[in-house]
Structures are given as C-alpha cells and as structure tokens.
Image (tube, helix red, strand yellow):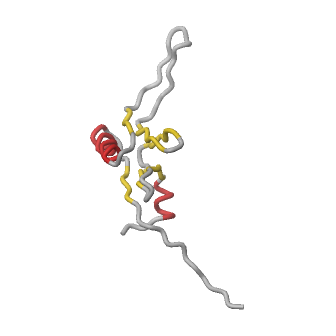
Amino acid sequence: METRKFAKISDPIEVVQFTGGRDNGQEIVAWVREKGRGARWEEAEEAWIAEDEKHSVPEKPEMIRLRTPRGFKEVLIGHWIALGDDGNFRSLTDEEIKEGYVSV
C-alpha cells in the first residue's frame, strides 16, 4: 500500500481590519457596499439607567454591523472583515487570521 500526503491549498482572501473610529468605519462600510453587500458603522454608546429603571440602555461597543447570508454579524474593533471567493463577507478575529492565513 502506498500512502501520500496532501496539503490543503487555500485561495487568497481580501481582508481589511477594523481599527475603530468614524473614518475607518465608514471606509470599510463603503468597501463592503462597493462589493454589493450591506454594512453600517455604529458608534459606541454609554450605558444609562432611567429613573424608572424600565427604559435603561446597556453599554454598546463601537462596531460594524455586517450583513451576511445568515443575518447580521457584529465586527468589533481589532477584528478583520474578509471577502470570500463567493462574494460573501465574514468576520475573523486577529487570532483566526494568524492561525489560518499568511500575507501574500
């Protein structure tokens, strides 16, 4: 019996990192929209508690809401947005980029 080894070959992906701030957020949203997909940048919001405690709002971090085939994905500061060969976007953490990809 002869055994052989195969390595998985991955096609390059196009990525951009969300570093935070209005300019970076809006540039990424424009890039996503140029590719025919939906996204929006949202500012961070501080938590506040109403006197009646019924209308309180929890803290919300700055993020990009990225439309995916399965709904919206929250992309937080430091995460990467990847454009796949299928034309869909996905969010990747810095760790996922380091473990699964090399810069070309």
Figure quadrant of the C terminus: bottom left
Percent of width and height locating residue 17:
37, 51
Percent of width and height locating residue 32:
35, 46
Q: Is residue 1 left or right of residue 64?
A: right
Percent of width and height locating residue 72:
49, 39
Seen in the picture, residue 76 relative to 98 is either above or below; the reply is above
Seen in the picture, residue 54 relative to 63 is either above or below; the reply is above
Residue at x-position 43% and y-position 59%: 85
Name the outermost residue toward the top.
Answer: 52
Name the outermost residue toward the right.
Answer: 1
Seen in the picture, residue 19 relative to 100 is either above or below; the reply is above
Residue at x-position 48% and y-position 52%: 93
Residue at x-position 55% and y-position 12%: 53
Residue at x-position 27% and y-position 40%: 23
Percent of width and height locating residue 10:
48, 68
Seen in the picture, residue 99 relative to 78 is either above or below; the reply is below
Query: What is the total number of numbered labels drawn onto the structure image?
Result: 0
